[in-house]
């Protein structure tokens, strides 16, 4: 799960929505519509979902709908689930590659 560091205004907290320019983040890739992310606001973490994605010539803009504040325990649980998903994906990919190499007759 991607994490975006922001300083949320009081308005954004109340409206539970914030606009983010991709160029102002440290994301290594673009976000997808509907994707869930973590928003770090100082020491506080919130869940958020990508509600809108707008592409312009110079940048990509995301509108994030902010969810509730996440406790430290929930944060660690979310990170652990993300790591387990990644491990399962890597396991499936390596099994696929092993089947392809084993089934090709190459020894």
Image: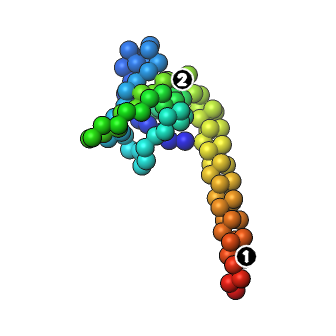
Give residue 103's mark. Answer: 1
Looking at the picture, tell me which residue is in the foreground, 42 or 63: 63
Give residue 24's mark. Answer: none
Q: Along the horizontal axis of the image, is 36 left or right of 59?
A: right
Looking at the picture, tell me which residue is in the foreground, 14 or 76: 14
Q: Residues within 10 Å of mark 2 (few under 14, many from 20)?
A: some
- Tell me residue 54's x, y (percent): 37, 33
The residue tagged 2 is 67
Could you tell me which residue is drawn at 68 percent across and 76 percent down?
Answer: 101
- Mark 2 or mark 1, whichever is nearer to me: 1
- Tell me residue 76's x, y (percent): 61, 38
Q: Residue furthest bottom?
A: 107
- Tell me residue 58's x, y (percent): 26, 41
Could you tell me which residue is drawn at 44 percent across and 21 percent down?
Answer: 17
Q: How many marks?
A: 2
Which quarter of the figure has residue 96?
Answer: bottom right
**What SS does tag 2 mark?**
strand
Locate the C terminus by quadrant: bottom right
Is 68 located above or below residue 86 in the figure? above
Q: Along the horizontal axis of the image, is 9 left or right of 84?
A: left
Could you tell me which residue is drawn at 73 percent across and 76 percent down?
Answer: 103
- Tell me residue 104's x, y (percent): 69, 78
**What SS does tag 1 mark?**
helix
């Amino acid at each position: 799960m991607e994490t975006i560091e922001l300083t949320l205004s009081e308005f954004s907290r109340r409206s539970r929505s914030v606009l983010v320019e991709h160029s102002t983040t440290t994301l290594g890739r673009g976000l997808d519509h509907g994707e869930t992310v973590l928003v770090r606001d100082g020491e506080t973490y919130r869940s958020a979902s990508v509600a809108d994605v707008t592409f312009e010539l110079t940048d990509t803009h995301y509108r994030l709908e902010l969810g509730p504040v996440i406790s430290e325990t929930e944060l660690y649980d979310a990170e652990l689930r993300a790591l387990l998903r990644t491990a399962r994906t890597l396991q499936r990919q390596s099994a696929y590659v092993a089947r392809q190499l084993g089934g090709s007759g190459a020894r």
